[in-house]
Image: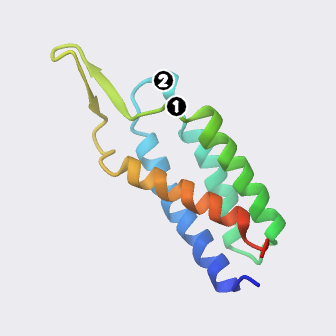
Amino acid sequence: MVDLLDKKNMLSGLVQNLTLLVEMLKLEPNPKHQYAPFFEYYLGEARQLAERECTFAELKELSLALEGLLTRNFLDYSPAVFDAATGKFTAVRGTKNYYETLSKVTQLTLALRTLGVY
């Protein structure tokens, strides 16, 4: 059986890292690449679950929805802008830890889905 403290810690970690991810995504200057509202929605969902005693089914539902967003709609996104002067892409300012944060969100999303299975 899964320790309920693990569930709370994982959900807290997801909220923390989703918050960081949303902050970075809001820095995206290209209006065609505005993913922040989608992740902000799921951040709100995660916060609501973290504020009360949630079920494993609710965690799984959140996890599956986030996984779908991460893998289908977001897979090729990179926070970069093209600099015509240099002919190169450069990272959007303020997104230094983007890939680390995205990795944590992905890992926690997948881990939450498996809670309650064993």
Identify the residue position indicated by label 1 in the image.
Answer: 34
Determine whether 24 is above or below 13 in the image. above
| Residue shown at the point (57%, 71%) measured from the top left | 12
Viewer-proximal residue, 103 or 22?
103
Assess disc 2: are there few (<14), some (14-19) or many (≥20) residues with their C-alpha within 10 Å of its C-alpha: few
Q: Left or right: where does residue 41 sit relative to residue 101?
A: right
Q: Amino acid at mark 1?
A: Gln
Residue 115 appears at what percent x and percent y? Answer: 73, 71
Q: In terms of image quadrants, where is residue 91? A: top left
Question: In 3D space, how far apart are the residues under numbered discs 2 and 1 (Cα atoms)?
Answer: 6 Å
The N terminus, quarter of image: bottom right
Viewer-proximal residue, 77 or 26?
77
Residue 22 appears at what percent x and percent y? Answer: 49, 48
| Residue shown at the point (53%, 40%) measured from the top left | 36
**Callout 1: SS:** loop
Viewer-proximal residue, 115 or 79?
115
**Callout 2: SS:** helix
The extreme front residue here reads 118
Q: In terms of image quadrants, where is residue 49? A: bottom right
| Residue shown at the point (74%, 76%) measured from the top left | 52
| Residue shown at the point (21%, 15%) measured from the top left | 87
Identify the residue position indicated by label 2 in the image.
Answer: 31
Determine whether 33 is above or below 7 in the image. above
Is disc 2 in contact with disc 1, using a CB cutoff of under 8 Å?
yes
- Tag of residue 2: none
